[in-house]
Image: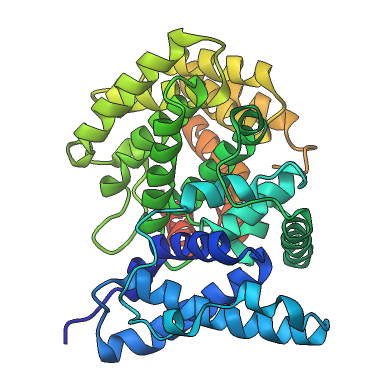
């Protein structure tokens, strides 16, 4: 039997299964436990038995059975035997073939908006969605938020409890409710994409399945809200960024920086679509951060070579972004762009202002930018020191190797 990429198969199915189970039974927290057990069962059985003809239906059936057990146990403990019937499948449905689908609908988008319920704080909305829809681990989410893992565990647990206690129906929110949740939905998709494009930890530089799933979900939101400029901008940003993915990794899995990438490997169809989307979004109303980031990505993608990149225009766009909000990563990227447009000394002067900002001052990206600017300025000792600091602060193996290699190369200069 050929090798089966079980993880790649299960990742997009997991939120669909969870959504289907929540729709049928409610009980978000128990439904997630049941879905996880179904995924574990698939990992154990499918490599030996083969993938079912309808994997999604198989998972929903197994999760439904497990949820029935969990609900019976929960109800027994709480002396609610009279409600068991309302949460239990009829026996004839329990015995139906596992491959028989209960529904062909994809509830992922409904699940996405459910996780962004206004009963939750914005941070909890994003964390829960990343866990339930994006499939990220609590550790990965904690790194994305730059908080301890224990803090993120408590946040996600409280979010599940709040969803359970709210008894909100599992349906797409009405139009007036939808607007309130959209910002959290978009930010969550943005974070999931970023984790897929540049993994915070592990042996691989990127996790293509996460980036692909984020793009798929964003397309769904765009189909729902085609006239929303920020939704359009986010989809454009993802496409324009993901277009470079084939050139970011060398033959040994090593990181290839943008300046050294073979631009012939970039996905021209994704670039064409992304440019068209951002061109459509920018004139359509108030300009938001996703549209501006997409415009920056478009300038990178449309440059014939790294040397021909329009750095002054990129600096100008970052300055507009800075006026929209206090974002330390935008400030860091602005400093890097200024270094490219006006020289390393100008960029280093801006970096010096960020040394007291604890949100970014200890991040590996801060030290990587500083190292690059010092290298451009000819201060090789300072560049080596910063490359080494950057390497010590990232938990992604290809990034560590790249940064150590940069440092070692300067040692021989």
125 lies above or below 327:
below
Q: Is residue 278 above or below residue 265?
A: above
Q: Nearer the viewer, residue 296 or 81?
A: 81
Quarter of the rendering occupied by the N terminus? bottom left
Picture residue at 26% right of the left edge, 34% below the top: 270
Q: State the image coordinates of residue 314 (x, y, percent, origin top left).
A: 47, 18
Whether residue 341 is visible:
yes
Which is more toward the observer, 103 or 283? Answer: 103
Q: Is residue 362 left or right of residue 1?
A: right
Q: Is residue 281 left or right of residue 319?
A: left
Q: Position of residue 66 (x, y in %)?
A: 55, 82
Query: In the image, what residue occupies the spot 17% across and 82% down?
Result: 2
Visible in this render: residue 381?
Answer: no
Choose top left, top right, bottom left or bottom right for residue 371: top right
223 up-or-down from 261: above or below: above
Number of numbered tags placed on the structure image: 0
Residue visible at 30% across and 76% down in the picture: 99
Residue 303, picture quadrant? top left
Taking depth in this image into account, of 345 and 132 the one nearest to the observer is 132
């Amino acid at each position: 039997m050929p090798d089966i990429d079980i993880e790649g198969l299960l990742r997009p199915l997991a939120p669909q299964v969870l959504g289907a189970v929540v729709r049928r039974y409610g009980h978000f927290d128990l439904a997630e436990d049941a879905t996880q057990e179904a995924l574990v069962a698939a990992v154990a059985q499918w490599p030996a038995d083969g993938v079912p003809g309808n994997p999604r239906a198989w998972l929903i059936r197994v999760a439904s059975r497990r949820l029935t057990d969990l609900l019976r146990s929960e109800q027994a403990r709480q002396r609610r035997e009279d409600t068991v019937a309302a949460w239990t499948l009829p026996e004839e449905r329990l015995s139906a073939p596992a491959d028989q689908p209960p529904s062909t609908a994809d509830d992922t988008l409904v699940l996405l908006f459910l996780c962004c319920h206004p009963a939750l704080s914005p941070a909890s909305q994003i964390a829960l969605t990343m866990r339930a829809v994006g499939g990220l681990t609590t550790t990965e989410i904690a790194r994305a938020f730059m908080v301890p893992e224990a803090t993120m565990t408590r946040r996600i647990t409280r979010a599940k409890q709040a969803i359970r206690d709210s008894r909100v129906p599992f349906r797409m929110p009405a139009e007036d409710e939808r607007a309130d949740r959209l910002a959290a939905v978009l930010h969550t998709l943005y974070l999931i994409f970023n984790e897929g494009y540049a993994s915070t930890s592990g042996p691989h530089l990127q996790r293509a399945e996460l980036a692909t799933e984020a793009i798929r979900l964003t397309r769904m939101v765009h189909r729902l809200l085609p006239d929303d400029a920020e939704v359009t901008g986010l989809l454009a940003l993802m496409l324009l960024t993901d277009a470079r993915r084939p050139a970011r990794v060398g033959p040994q899995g090593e990181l290839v920086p943008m300046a050294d990438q073979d631009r012939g490997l970039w996905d021209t169809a994704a670039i064409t679509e992304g440019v068209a989307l951002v061109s459509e979004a920018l004139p359509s109303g108030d300009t938001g951060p996703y549209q501006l980031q997409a415009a920056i990505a478009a300038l990178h993608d449309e440059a014939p070579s790294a040397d021909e990149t329009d750095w002054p225009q990129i600096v100008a766009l970052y300055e507009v972004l800075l006026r929209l909000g206090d974002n330390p990563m935008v400030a860091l990227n602005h400093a890097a762009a200024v270094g490219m447009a006006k020289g390393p000394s100008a960029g280093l002067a801006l970096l010096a202002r960020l040394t007291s900002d604890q949100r970014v001052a200890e991040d590996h990206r801060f030290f990587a930018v500083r190292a690059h600017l010092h290298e451009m300025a000819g201060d090789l000792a300072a560049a080596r020191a910063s490359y080494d600091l950057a390497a010590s602060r990232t938990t992604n193996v290809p990034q560590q190797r790249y940064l150590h290699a940069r440092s070692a190369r300067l040692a021989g200069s």
